[in-house]
Image (cartoon, rainbow, N blue to C red):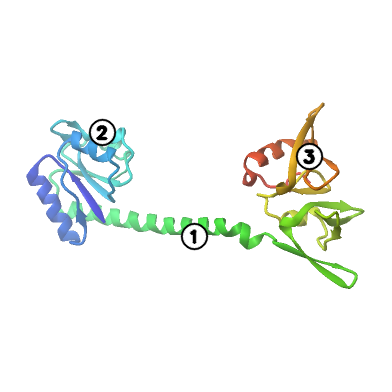
């Protein structure tokens, strides 16, 4: 753990240093800061520390005024002879407020609190990191990359990326391909299919069709605010349901911002 001491009285600063080293001699104590001007400069340089022990009334001003204007990325233990700043101080990343005279017991208790907070924060960071890693892997790990399709005694393996369009025809879902072929899928409903497709690339434009964004050639806005989609390598023009138009706009800007199957 790195600790910064902000104190304009040399004797008090040395006492704090001694208490910290007695508490744990592996703690790294950064060079002393003894003025608001130095503290402001140090914070502007975005130096890293885990904990700041900060006196409030320094020779050139009040340290709280400096901290208010800064981005603080560390916990702060305030050390002061004045009891009228505590409410304001604890809003500035303050985890403790020690009134002078400072004793070893006060410092040890404050450092215990700092250590406990650090452990909780580290645990939360690890959990968030794991969740983020899982989120990043989700498109590859959970969305279908291919569909096995049986036609009579022959099985075709369709790469999901190569499917231009999914369409319901007489109650059966078909995958339509670049070469004009259409092959039936075993999925029973379009809602079921949607959960298996990566929403970054696939969007349901109406009750019976899901398009592949890789094949969008153009989107034409006709009179009456009708949206017509032309896909590459596909002769038909596709109509977007009025209930899906706003979601289509959002999806085009940020594909992962919406859930595809809320309207059907």
- N-terminal-most mark, 2 or 3: 2
Per the image, label 1 sits on a secondary structure element best described as: helix
Label 2 and label 3: CA atoms lie apart by: 57 Å
Left or right, residue 11 beside residue 52? left
Residue receiving disc 2? 66
- Observer-side mark, 2 or 3, equals 3
Label 1 and label 2: CA atoms lie apart by: 36 Å
For label 1, the crowd category at 10 Å Cα-Cα, with few meaning under 14, some 14 to 19 and many 20 or more, is few
Q: Nearer the viewer, residue 157 or 203?
A: 157
Name the disc covering residue 36, or none.
Answer: none
Q: CB under 8 Å between callouts 2 and 3?
A: no
Residue receiving disc 1? 130
Q: CB under 8 Å between callouts 1 and 2?
A: no
For label 2, the crowd category at 10 Å Cα-Cα, with few meaning under 14, some 14 to 19 and many 20 or more, is some
Q: Is residue 96 visible?
A: no
Residue 218, picture quadrant: top right
**Count of numbered badges drawn on the protein:** 3
Residue occupying image coordinates x 70% and y 48% = 214
Residue receiving disc 3? 229
Q: Residue furthest bottom?
A: 153
Q: Nearer the viewer, residue 204 or 4?
A: 204
């Amino acid at each position: 753990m790195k600790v910064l001491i902000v104190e304009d009285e040399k004797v008090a600063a040395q006492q704090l240093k001694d208490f910290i080293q007695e508490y744990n001699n592996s703690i790294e104590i950064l060079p002393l800061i003894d003025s608001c001007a130095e503290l402001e400069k140090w914070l502007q340089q975005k130096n890293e520390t885990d904990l700041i022990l900060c006196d409030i009334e320094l020779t050139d001003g009040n340290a709280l005024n400096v901290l208010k204007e800064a981005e603080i990325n560390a916990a702060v233990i305030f050390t002061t002879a004045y009891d009228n700043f505590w409410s304001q101080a604890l809003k500035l990343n303050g985890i403790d407020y020690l009134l002078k005279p400072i004793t070893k017991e006060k410092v040890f208790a404050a450092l215990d609190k700092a250590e406990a907070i650090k452990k909780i924060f580290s645990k939360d960071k690890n959990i968030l990191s794991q969740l983020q890693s899982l989120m990043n892997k989700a498109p590859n790990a959970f969305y279908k990359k291919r569909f096995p399709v049986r036609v009579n005694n022959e099985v075709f393996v369709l790469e999901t990326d190569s499917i231009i369009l999914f369409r319901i025809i007489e109650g059966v879902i078909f995958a339509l391909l670049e070469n004009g072929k259409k092959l039936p899928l075993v999925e029973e409903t379009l809602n079921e299919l949607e959960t298996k497709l990566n929403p970054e690339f696939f969007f349901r434009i109406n009750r019976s069709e899901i398009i592949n964004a890789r094949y969008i050639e153009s989107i034409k806005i006709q009179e009456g605010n009708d949206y017509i989609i032309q896909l590459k390598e596909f002769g038909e023009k596709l109509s977007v349901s009025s209930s899906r138009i706003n979601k289509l706009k959002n999806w085009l800007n940020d594909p992962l911002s919406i859930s595809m199957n809320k309207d059907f």
